Image: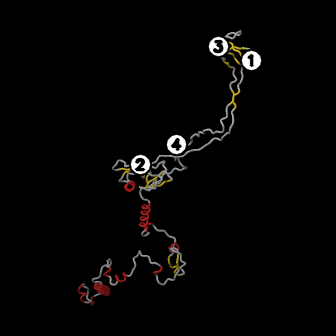
Amino acid sequence: MSAVTDLLNLPKPDSRSEEQESVVDAFLATAAALDMIDAILSAYATSIAGKAEAAHGHAIDAIEGLAHALASKRDKDVLIEFDEVSGFPSLPGVPLGYVLARSEVGLAFLSPAAAIGAHQHAMGEIVGLSGALSALSDDIERATSAGTVTFVAGSTPPDGWLRANGATVSRSAYSDLFSRIGTTFGAGNGSTTFQIPDLRGEFIRGWDDGRGIDGARVLGSSQSDQNKSHVHTGSAESGGAHSHSGSTSTDSHNHTVPAAASDIEGQGQGRVYTTATTGNAWNRSTTSDSHSHSLSINSGGAHTHDLSIDSSGGNEARPRNIALLSCIKY
């Protein structure tokens, strides 16, 4: 105590007032508390000597027993089949796709929607969804390969398709399509472009490919319209043996009678006799009153008549049809 008193130049006990004595006691108590804190901190320092910082890591091999404990664990993406889980009774009545979940009455098989409840997820939160959709898109793309032809009930081709209108396009920009059809429908400029088929207004016919129905054709060749060679038969109904009536004109007209070779006595030159007993004669050229003549036409027997049939139709042969947009996959 005297050492502390001397060090701090405090008054001697016999010369300190009561107030001074109280201050010294408080100081000494504080000093004792600080000594205790120093001892505690020293003990802590000794106990944590050589320890790692709070934020640190360990290799798996550095954690004793961890590698052995993990050796029998499954990968997080591996699914466990029901028949691999011991202790579950056979449940033949459980529908496919149901999951085992804990409910208010214990374990029960529920549909995924019932087990999880109503909720939503952003696409990015669903593990593997983006990759699965990308793979599905690739599968769809592969299923419809370049060069496939289809018809669209609209005026604009869908994404990944071109109008099949005979256009000249780039070989590099449409490399997949060029590798499939080449220059079958036109070589373009012969180096950097090629042509796609022009299906506007055309009916599509399957390539014969050696069958023999439409031989002597190459893939992609065009063919003009044509009707198959054929004949038409026809007849007019027979009228049987029959006759036709007729008439001549009833206008006044002249009959010319050849002149006599010589004059007949008493009658004068230029007159002729009839065979009538009266012996009347008339002029060589004489006019008859209006009259008619009977006309008889011989029968032609049973016969037929040629029949001409007028043509009909338009400028092409075609079936009933509907117009759609022809497209080709590139």
> Residue 284's quadrant in the figure?
top right
Q: CA distance from mark 3 to mark 2?
A: 97 Å
Q: Quadrant of the N terminus?
A: bottom left
Q: Could you tell me which residue is drawn at 52 percent across and 70 percent down?
A: 118
Kindly identify which numbered label has been placed on residue 261: 3
Q: CA distance from mark 1 to mark 4?
A: 75 Å
Q: CA distance from mark 2 to mark 1?
A: 100 Å
Q: Is residue 235 visible?
A: yes
Label 2 vs label 1, nearer the camera: 1
Q: Secondary structure at mark 4?
A: loop
Label 4 Cα crowd, 10 Å radius (few <14 / some 14-19 / many 20+): few
Kindly identify which numbered label has been placed on residue 167: 2
Label 3 Cα crowd, 10 Å radius (few <14 / some 14-19 / many 20+): few
Q: Is residue 27 visible?
A: no
Residue type of the residue flagged with mark 4? Asn
Q: Is residue 239 above or below residue 55?
A: above
